[in-house]
Amino acid sequence: MMAALALGCFTSRTESQHTTAATEQSDPETRAMQLLQANCFTCHNPDLEIELRIAPPMFKIRDHYIDDTIRRESFVRQIVDFVNDPTEERAVMYGAIRNFGLMPRQQFNQSDLHFIAGYLYDNDVSSDAWYAKWDSFQKRQVPQQTNFSSYEEMGLQFANGTKSQLGSKLLGAIQSKGTVGAISFCNIEALPLTDSMSKVFQASIRRVSDKPRNPANSANSRELATMLEWKGKMEAGEPLSPVTFEKEGKVIGHYPIMTSAMCMQCHGQPGTQILQQTQDVLSTLYPTDRATGYAPNQLRGIFVVEMRKREKDH
């Protein structure tokens, strides 16, 4: 939960007052695993063998907050306060900020957030014993649409999974080729990779924007209405919640894409944040580019997830 993704950690648990029925009914350990998987591990992957990270692993975060003197209440409060309002003044992991950027401001279910922070205090998530529990949990998971208690939750998981794939590939391209070299990834591979994730999840997944770089990612009138609604909420200081609705026998989910500091290399201010060499390549590949002029923590676009209705819902 605690660092920016190259694509902006665009979607999160919402400020909805419900926790999923699946997590409410499970034992505390299983509930913790489910919440970590849904809210944290998309970015803070616990896999120790992963080569290209998009955020620090969760045990590193725990190590920076915990010591022999801190009480559980203080630990939980510090985690919750930072996640709800991530600023450099509140941060304790300055190296992570240098490497990944500051976590964009997001909205999380507060009950879930407190539960996760308390679980991190109580459990050493770097231990062999914990990894054995995590491995066992993963083996029990069946990533099917029937496992989710709501379409909003289902779409969130599909959007998060797609975000993770795009973010790790993009960060790898930036690290190996630099910003200019990484533009080719977005130009050539981003759309096919998103399509491949649609096949994995058996759902249609698209990224759209009111200021697209690629015209193929232009938002339609319904999607533009969602963005306008969200921008109004942001101006009023209100949390952003996913939008779901039915259309032609399917359920459509909208999930916000937010910018992070890392995004400014290609989506910030031309001439200052976007270097001239980068701008030249962008202008060549995207002559109608409108996707610049952003600042961190702004609404960049929408993940649109189209889900088929489950048999029990017909």
Image (tube, rainbow, N blue to C red):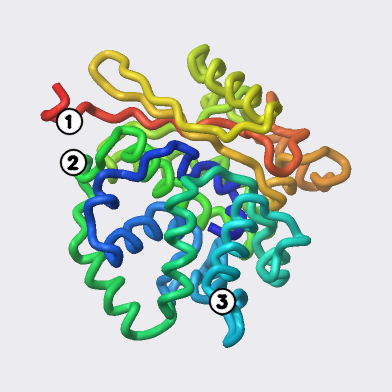
**Compared with residue 246, is residue 241 higher up or lower down, i.e. above or below?**
below
CA distance for labels 3 and 2: 40 Å
Report the residue marked by disc 1. Answer: 310
Quadrant position of residue 239: top right
Q: Are marks 3 and 1 in contact (CB under 8 Å)?
A: no
Image quarter hosting the C terminus: top left
Q: Along the line of sight, which residue is nearer the eye, 246 or 119?
A: 119
CA distance for labels 2 and 1: 7 Å
**Comes first in the chain, label 2 or label 1:** 2
| Residue appearing at x 76%, y 46% in the figure | 278
| Residue appearing at x 23%, y 17% in the figure | 249
Is disc 1 placed on a helix, strand or loop?
Answer: loop
Q: Along the line of sight, which residue is nearer the eye, 128 or 7?
A: 128
**Comes first in the chain, label 3 or label 2:** 3
Q: Is residue 11 left or right of residue 263?
A: left
**Compared with residue 244, is residue 263 higher up or lower down, i.e. above or below?**
below
Amino acid at pointer 1:
Arg
CA distance for labels 3 and 1: 45 Å
Amino acid at pointer 2:
Thr
Q: Is residue 87 left or right of residue 78?
A: right
Q: Is residue 290 visible?
A: no
- Total tally of numbered discs in the picture: 3
| Residue appearing at x 33%, y 63% in the figure | 33
Q: Is residue 188 visible?
A: yes
Q: Position of residue 182 (x, y in %)?
A: 62, 52
Report the residue marked by disc 2. Answer: 146
Report the residue marked by disc 3. Answer: 71
Is disc 3 placed on a helix, strand or loop?
Answer: loop
Q: Position of residue 114 (x, y in %)?
A: 48, 58
Of labels 3 and 1, the one closer to you: 3
Q: Position of residue 179 (x, y in %)?
A: 69, 53
Q: Along the line of sight, which residue is nearer the eye, 58 or 99?
A: 58
